[in-house]
Amino acid sequence: MPIEVHNTLGRRREEFTPGKPGEVTLYVCGPTVYRELHIGNFRAFVVFDTVARYLEYRGHRVHRVQNFTDIDDKMINRAQELGIGVPELAQRYIEVYFADADALRVRRAEVHPRATEHIPEILELCRVLQDKGHAYQVGGDLYFAADSFPGYGKLSGQDLAQLEAGARVEVDERKRRPADFALWKAQKPGEPAWDSPWGKGRPGWHIECSAMAMRYLGHPVDIHAGGADLIFPHHENEIAQSEAATDGPFVRYWMHNGYLNLEGRKMSKSLGNVLTVSELRHSFSPEEIRFFLISAHYRSPLNYGPELLQAAAGGLERLRTVLTRLGELHAQAGEIPTEADQAFRGRLAAARQEFEAAMDADFNTADALAALFELTREVNQRLSTANSRPLLQEVAALYRELGGVLGLLEEEQTEELDSDLQRLVQARERARAVRDWAEADRIRAQLRDRGVVLEDTAQGVRWKRSRS
RNA sequence: GGCGACGUAGCCAAGCGGUAAGGCAGAGGACUGCAAAUCCUUUAUCCCCGGUUCAAAUCCGGGCGUCGCCUCCA
């Protein structure tokens, strides 16, 4: 079964084939590092991390590049606000980004290029565009002439004429047409700047992604991804400038994720309704956050709410519980394969198949999770110590493997109980052994008050942390 | 004004022409010393109105509603 991808360019689901068999180039538009990101931003990074993981699962080697925009108006303003240099600001928030991304199990890209470290590539691209008549200079600024690129608007479905008719852009006087955009911006007093043929200045926003994507991944890039808010104008402009410069296609598949909404409105820095990962981590684990973020299809809007995260956490808990149970069974099972094993083995293959079918269909993580839940019901229903260790191991390995594709269930939970808590558990066991239920219940309540929930199973007592 | 997305059970959410997955929460039952976990049972005129079709949540047309992009934005 082929993998199918919804390509924003054309708005159709298409069969995915890498330009070079077995190798996939993936460029994800990264953050502007002027402040801490919010979980809406991270939806994109988690989603495309999952995409990359699945492509790898499917046997592709994935070359991932994700940039940092470390120079633009917001960077300059914020640095001034904080009284620090732009490079310091960038460094600070790049570190914050990685801390959050690592926690959410977003794998690092092969390269995380920064705009300021690719000025030569950017200048070269600007020069080519100017030479080919796609750019014009006004003072120290260089603009891309949108109407010089016939395909302008093909990604977003915008029509140049309409764009201008309805433009409520505050028109930059120096631009010939409202849809034109800056490739290079002249330095204003006090701003960081680099030398260029047009005088001292800095790159425009759109050009950096084109320059860095092509620098590291060549062209066309297989997949170029980002949030839906980047479709226009950012990605439209990237296409225009890149294709005008190279006379060839820039990207084969464009992928865009839907927004994360807060109270029905898009979570965004400018609206001020944001929630950061570190804030959310006071109440939920990174794994629960990740589960939540992939619990809907990536192109659908997703609402945030504490109760929604709570529901997601409940679902994840179910998966974690079955893994614990598999471990307990494993400890007591025999080595010899049994008939019960054989009966179940077919189910494993089916679960894998369902999972793959879901992910093949434009990375339907919600459906993929459903496959794991269906497997879980059957495991809980049918697996026992009548199964052999090898089979139980196989089941656990499947959870780890498929969960791993989603960035979940990767690490063991190996937390140990404090020794005094352990003593309480043992004391309760002793009380239970002599059927002193009052004492046992008293201790259980005591543990509950200290955040530990007990479950008495056929395999012995099991404990877990309660959510406070 | 232009472009676009979405509307499925109390909540979340799959579904891409063949008769409604899955999760969370609730109710009942089984298991349990009691719980918890788990299992079983249980809940949908798929926003409305037309149309196409043997057959539509799925396609087409028209409404209504919500949200987004067109300015920095994942």
Image (cartoon, rainbow, N blue to C red):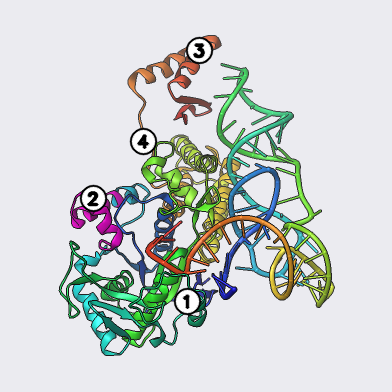
Q: Residue at x 35, y 76 (%)?
A: A173
Task: Check residue A442 in the rendering and tell me which mark sits there, or answer none.
Answer: 3
Q: Position of residue A391 (x, y in %)?
A: 48, 47
Which is in the foreground here, disc 3 or disc 2? 2
Drawn side of residue A161 relative to residue A120, left or right:
right
Residue A414's disc is 4
Mark 2 element type:
helix
At mark 1, the secondary structure is loop
Q: Count neighbours of disc 4 (C-alpha within 10 A) and say few if under 14, some if 14 to 19, many if 20 or more.
A: few
Magenta segment: A68-97
**Residue A275 badge:** none
**Residue A86 lies within the magenta run:** yes
Is residue A227 one of those drawn in magenta? Answer: no
> Do marks 1 and 4 both belong to one polypeptide chain?
yes
Task: Read off the residue under disc 1.
Answer: A155
Q: Nearer the viewer, mark 3 or mark 1?
A: 1
